[in-house]
């Protein structure tokens, strides 16, 4: 298993756009050369995850009800210039991987069996392109090798790796060393230390001309297959190809320990909570509340639109966070129409969609039995839509004409809404909070 070279202090603080759902086309951006040759990816995913200390291999651990490997696959599938993603798994995990591919609609994936070591698994992945009768895995010009448990890889880096591999024959991402590397004696004493400024940590992704890396694996020894850890070294040793090294961002870290799963989940949640869409009813009070909420949610990119209609389909596909404003007593038709749109467009397949249904109460003359009925109906609705990966939360806010009191209520509403969107806690769905 490849050794982890990143410390926890090197975790990214800002997830940026690493989970953007729709990648920009590289050819449309200034300064980016178009990729006009076939590119494929090999993801070795046969590791047992011993350091994770969990019953399931870490690549199959779930974050927001979705396996980690699915996030990594999507990072490549969303790029139009990448053709095939070959996922190499242990034989006992073959059916599990096929289920993941089907459930999350991964259309570019071909699943193959791996070997007993990392290098044997990579070679198995490369051999998948040798089957000329299989149209799903045509031979690429450049192949990218990446770790299944490094989900945060950006298009800019992949583009640099790919173009450098085409020109040089091999390329790889590097990062500065975080800790000083030392050598010890057999008795356990310090022998010497390396000058950290002269060395770099080799990371993934790495890119190769397919013919170069395939030939290197054909020529490498049993010792390489059993104990080797560096694909770039194989290309140099057996094909004489010296890789171009490219500085990578901090987001290249690898999920290795349990704490890394929590860090990955925090990054994904933070990224998903960067935008929201406020859908307001036609009432003047709801419209005014929508404007105030938009002002208060200044840390998010927000749009305010009228009640969900077909003309708003673009907004419903733009984000995965929605704040639906209506008057108390309004029916759930607007929410159901949104959920129907998400089902028809598969919008909630990869990431959970959050709907915070804010009900503006203009009168306090509601009896306890009415409140009980409202809560029961809301819980039933929430339990139904969560089956489609939609998290429905409810907040009732009492309207008041006292400015200071109303301002405090709206501020509290803002805080609760932000917390619900960021935490995405399924256990809180179906609760009707009151402000």
Image (cartoon, rainbow, N blue to C red):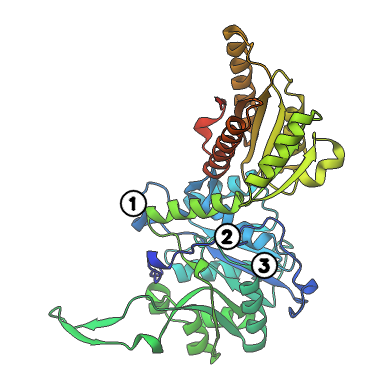
Label 3 SS: loop
Mark earlier in primary sequence (3, 1): 1
Give the position of the N terminus as an image quadrant. Answer: bottom left
Distance from Cα at disc 1 to Cα at disc 2: 23 Å
Report which residue position mark 2 lands on.
87
Q: Which residue is mark 1?
A: 53
Distance (Cα) linking label 3 and label 1: 37 Å
Q: Is residue 79 left or right of residue 152?
A: right
Whether residue 271 is visible to the viewer of this picture, yes or no, is: yes
Question: Residue 81: x and y, percent?
Answer: 74, 68
Label 1 Cα neighbours within 10 Å, binned few <14 / some 14-19 / many ≥20: few
Dot 3: within a 10 Å radius of its alpha carbon, few (fewer than 14), some, or many (20 or more) residues? few
Q: Vertically, is 214 above or below 397?
A: below
Q: Earlier in the sequence, mark 2 or mark 3?
A: 2
Q: CA distance from mark 2 to mark 3?
A: 16 Å
Which one is nearer the viewer's eye here, 365 or 356? 365
Of residues 253 and 295, the one nearer the viewer is: 295
Residue 194 located left or right of residue 107 = left
């Amino acid at each position: 298993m490849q050794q982890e070279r990143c410390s926890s202090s090197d975790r990214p603080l800002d997830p940026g756009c690493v989970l953007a759902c729709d990648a920009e086309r590289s050819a449309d951006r200034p300064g980016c050369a178009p990729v006009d040759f076939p590119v494929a990816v090999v993801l070795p995913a046969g590791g047992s995850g011993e350091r994770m200390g969990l019953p399931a291999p870490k690549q199959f651990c779930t974050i927001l009800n979705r396996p980690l490997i699915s996030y990594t696959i999507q990072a490549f599938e969303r790029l139009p210039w990448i053709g095939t993603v070959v996922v190499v798994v242990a034989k006992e995990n073959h059916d599990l991987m096929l289920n993941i591919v089907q459930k999350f609609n991964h259309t570019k994936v071909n699943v193959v069996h791996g070997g007993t070591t990392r290098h044997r698994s990579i070679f198995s992945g490369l051999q998948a392109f040798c089957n000329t009768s299989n149209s799903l895995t045509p031979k690429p010009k450049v192949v990218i090798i990446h770790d299944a448990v490094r989900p945060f890889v950006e298009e800019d880096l992949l583009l640099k790796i790919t173009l450098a591999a085409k020109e040089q024959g091999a390329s790889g991402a590097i990062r500065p060393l975080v800790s000083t590397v030392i050598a010890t004696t057999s008795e356990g004493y310090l022998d010497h230390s390396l000058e950290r400024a002269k060395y770099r940590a080799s990371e993934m992704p790495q890119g190769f001309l397919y013919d170069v890396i395939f030939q290197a694996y054909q020529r490498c020894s049993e010792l390489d297959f059993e104990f080797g850890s560096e694909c770039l070294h194989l290309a140099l040793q057996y094909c004489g190809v010296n890789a171009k090294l490219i500085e990578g961002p901090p987001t290249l870290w690898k999920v290795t320990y349990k704490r890394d799963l929590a860090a990955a989940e925090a990054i994904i949640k933070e990224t998903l909570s960067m935008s929201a869409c406020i859908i307001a009813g036609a009432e003047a009070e709801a419209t005014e509340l929508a404007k105030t909420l938009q002002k208060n949610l200044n840390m998010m990119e927000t749009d305010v639109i009228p009640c969900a209609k077909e003309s708003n389909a673009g907004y419903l596909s733009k984000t995965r966070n929605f704040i639906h404003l209506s008057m108390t007593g309004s029916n759930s038709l607007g929410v159901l129409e949104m959920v129907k749109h998400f089902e028809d467009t598969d919008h909630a397949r990869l990431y959970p969609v959050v709907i915070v249904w804010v009900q503006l109460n203009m009168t306090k003359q509601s009896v306890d039995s009415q409140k009980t009925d409202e809560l029961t109906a809301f819980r039933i609705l929430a339990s139904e839509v969560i089956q489609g990966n939609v998290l429905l939360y409810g907040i009732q806010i009492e309207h008041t004409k006292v400015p200071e009191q109303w301002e405090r209520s709206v501020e509290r509403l803002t805080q609760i809404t932000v917390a619900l969107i960021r935490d995405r806690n399924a256990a809180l769905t179906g609760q009707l909070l009151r402000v």
